[in-house]
Image (spheres, grey):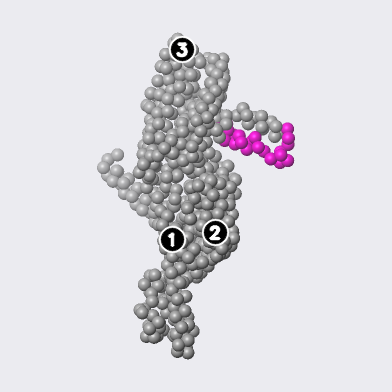
Amino acid sequence: MTRVGTVALNTFREAVRDRVLYNLVFFALVMIATAILVGQISVGIEQIVIVTLGLSAISIIGLLISVFIGVGLVSKEIEKRTLYALLAKPLRRWEFIFGKFAGLALTLTVNTAAMSVGLFLALFYVKHSIERADTAVLVAVYFILLKLTLVVALAMLFSCFTTPLLAILFTAGLYIAGLFVHEMRHMQAGTIDPALGGLLRGISYVLPNFENFDVMGAAAHGRVISGMLIAQNTIYAALYCAIVLAVAMAIFSQRNLK
Amino acid sequence: MNLKSYTALFLFVLLGLAGVGHLQKYIDAQQSSAANEDDQVMLRSSKLVKGLSLEYAPLAADIYWTRVVQYFGNKQAGKQVDLRLLWPLLDVTSVLDPQLMPVYDFGSTFLSDAPPRGAGRPDLAVELLERGLKANPDQWRLYYDLGFVYYFDMKDYAKASASLYEGSKNPKALIWMKTMAAKIATEGNSVETSNFLWQDVYNTTKDPLVKKNALRHLQLLRAEEDIKQIDTLADEYQKRFGRRPVRTSELMQSGLLRGEPVDPLGYPYILSEAGKAELNSKTPLRDKWFKEPASK
């Protein structure tokens, strides 16, 4: 595990060196500008828009980092030929994959935590207080983080067997498909061939369901998010990441790197 | 690059930007003359907009709601009464985020108020509020809004009473809602009820625009009452002197009025040639608000 930790820590350092965390400044500026502007141009949604915009920004920035850096984690090492030096050391291929995944997950956690602080500061600026109902915002941030780790796992899986461009397209495509799982499952009978409907329903259960992590509306309106959902989503994300990473490790272990 | 080159570059950028800014004004003028208002709601299918918004539908709803406010505000500022895009905008917003309460609260007012205050579509306001109640059955406030639309804009006092009564079943509802439901069921329209409802809006709202609207309605209600009183005095004058008065000064000279009667904004009431009391032509109440009496 020490070897995995070393790879993870170096991945985090590399991300910081690549100025990934610079987006935090952009995020802070967006939140401040929004907090001031929205009160002037709209009616009755000052707090709601801070939450929805903040969570959307955390999600979008996180997704960009997850997909683009996630895909580059393996391919860049191959391109720069630094992977050969690494694998020459006593480091197993699965340890390399898991370490890279953990490193980017750590980067995303730091990034998301910092943006959450900015979001709560903006919320405090507008409301002049933080209430118990605002814990729903924290849960929403946690769900975004779960979603991002799942996206990183997918990006790494695709980058193990295809080109970076295709890996980005596959990850983005699967992510968008994962947002329409409910629609796939509930296609109107009569508008679609029954066999195709059955196939789509079947696929909908194995696709990563990113709708599970969408509680932005509930957070914006201060609705309580059940502890059971938090537990279920945590297990779902962990299980799905484990499956995807296991496949990624298996593919990468078999890959001919010559 | 030397200093001369930097200066030349700086001047080029500065002049270039000034030129671009100037050119933009001409482009804006061209576009505004050819602008089609329908472009403001390019995507009218709420389902399509929701699909395109991916998981960011609540944020898209906030953006759409801001567009509603801006659209309505611009129309009001421009004294335009054509608000046909208000419903498509509200429709999309309420589908994007069914829990966004200001859409129902303010949107129903924008839709139901008679022109020029609103779109004059209480039927759509009812549709919007019923949609809101379907998504948020525990929100007693929506029953209150529905009762308001039925009472003031549709004059359907049975439905107004039923809405207020339904809302009053919620333990968090305003304490007077049940009493008011009974009062409306018995009396129908009354100045006292209208006054009470608008006074409650005035006292409870935090939004300055809504407060101003409620104040205007309250002022108008008082003006209506004043006018009825003056007409009664004019009837009395006619009984005594055999003719209708044509000036309020005649009512004062006869001792029926103690002083010059003024509206809530301080403008004196006038009497028409037929001897009927009216608002002064100079009062802002008449210009903007007296197209339709508030209590009816």
Q: Position of residue B5 (x, y in %)?
A: 30, 43
Mark 2 element type: helix
- Going 42% across and 25% down the picture, which residue do you hit? A106
Q: Is residue A179 magenta?
A: yes
How crowded pointer 1 is (Cα within 10 Å; few <14, some 14-19, many 20+) is rated as some
Q: Position of residue A104 (x, y in %)?
A: 44, 25
- Residue B79's place in the image compared with B69, above or below, is below
Q: Which residue is mark 3?
A: A91
Q: Position of residue A31 (x, y in %)?
A: 39, 42
Mark 1 sits on what residue?
B199
Boundaries of the magenta span: A173-195
Which chain does tag 3 point to?
A
Residue neighbourhood size for the residue with mark 3, other residues' Cα within 10 Å, grouped as few (<14), some (14–19), many (≥20): few
Q: Quadrant of the N terminus of chain A?
A: top left
Element under disc 1: helix
Q: Tell me the element at label 3.
A: loop
Numbered disc in front, either 3 or 1: 1
Q: Amino acid at mark 1?
A: Gln
Q: Chain of mark 1?
A: B
Tell me which chain the residue with mark 2 is part of.
Answer: B
- The residue indicated by pointer 2 is B182
Looking at this view, is B210 or B172 the one in front?
B172
Q: Is residue B291 above or below residue A238?
A: below
Identify which amino acid the numbered label 2 is placed on.
Ala
* Residue displayed at 52% across by 43% down: B57
Asked if badges 3 and 2 are on one and the same chain, I answer no
Q: Amino acid at mark 3?
A: Leu
- Label 2 neighbour load within 10 Å: few <14, some 14-19, many 20+: some
